[in-house]
Structure formats: C-alpha cells, structure tokens
Amino acid sequence: MAFQIGQRVTGHITGIQPYGAFVSLGGHRQGLIHISECHCGYVKDIHDYLAVNQEVDVVILDIDEFTGKISLSLRCLEHVDFNQETLPHQHRHYWTNHRINIGFKPIADRLSGWKAEASRRLDQEKVSS
C-alpha cells in the first residue's frame, strides 16, 4: 500500500515505550505515534490511552523520504469529519513569527560582528600554532 501524508489508516499497536507507541500498518510497514500525538493536552502516561494489540485509526503526519519512517497521530482525529479518507495536509512550520515581516534583517544586522569574531579566532589560532 502506498502511504501519503494526511491519509487516515488503521493499524495495531505492537509496542509501547515512554515516548510513544509503535503501530503495524500491514505488510512490513510500521509507524510511530509520539506521546504528544496521542491526545490533545498533556499526556502523563501513554498507557492511559493505548495498549498493545489495540486497533487504532491514525493519520499520517509525515513520511521521512530517506529512512521511510512514518509519523502518526491520534490527536488529529479528535475533532475531524470521520467521513473523509484523506485529511488535508496542514502542517506548517515557521522559523519566525509569520505575522512579523522582518525577513533576514536580524541576520544582516549581526553579520559584521560575526565576521569580526571569526577573524579574531582565526588570528588567535595562527598565533598559538
């Protein structure tokens, strides 16, 4: 079966660790539900929500293209329409606040200081060599 991000799939819990649960997705494919993706809010003990051999419906959050590791979520299904087979992909990661439009200005402002510091370090290494 070909998997895609946002797809809703069914699997069985094969193992539980303090950081998450391993889910068999059929064949030789396996995914991980990280503890933060078990339930909305704080999860003190993953065993309160999941058990080995439990059948679970999960959403595929990510598929690592190099390792093939599949990240899964139960949390995504807590407030969705269960008639959808594939959920819209909404994962967005912002390195800065997307409401503040400052671009690369902070880097540009510090660049001359970083260059001067690197130059001093190189000079010190030459002297000590």
Image: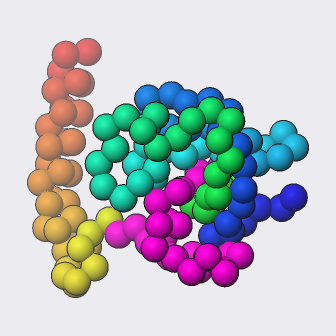
Picture mark count: 0
In the rendered view, does 89 fall on the left or right side of 2?
A: left
Q: Residue at x 84, y 39 (%)?
A: 28
Whether 38 is among the magenta residues is: no
Q: Can residue 4 be spotted in the picture? A: yes
Placement of the C terminus among the 4 image quadrants: top left
118 or 8: nearer the viewer:
8
Q: Can residue 23 be spotted in the picture? A: no
Magenta region: which residues? Answer: 66-94
Up-down: is 79 above or below 47?
A: below
The prevailing secondary structure element of the residues shown in magenta is loop
Q: Residue at x 44, y 29 (%)?
A: 18
Position of residue 44 measured from the top left corner of the image (x, y, whole percent): 31, 37
Q: Residue at x 22, y 83 (%)?
A: 99
In the rendered view, does 67 fall on the left or right side of 109?
A: right
Position of residue 55 measured from the top left corner of the image (x, y, whole percent): 68, 47
Q: Residue at x 24, y 24 (%)?
A: 126
47 or 35: nearer the viewer:
47
Placement of the N terminus among the 4 image quadrants: bottom right
Up-down: is 95 above or below 53?
A: below
Quadrant in which residue 107 is drawn: bottom left
Position of residue 82 measured from the top left corner of the image (x, y, whole percent): 61, 76
- Residue farthest to the top? 129
Structure colour scheme: rainbow
Position of residue 93 measured from the top left corner of the image (x, y, whole percent): 40, 67
55 or 20: nearer the viewer:
55
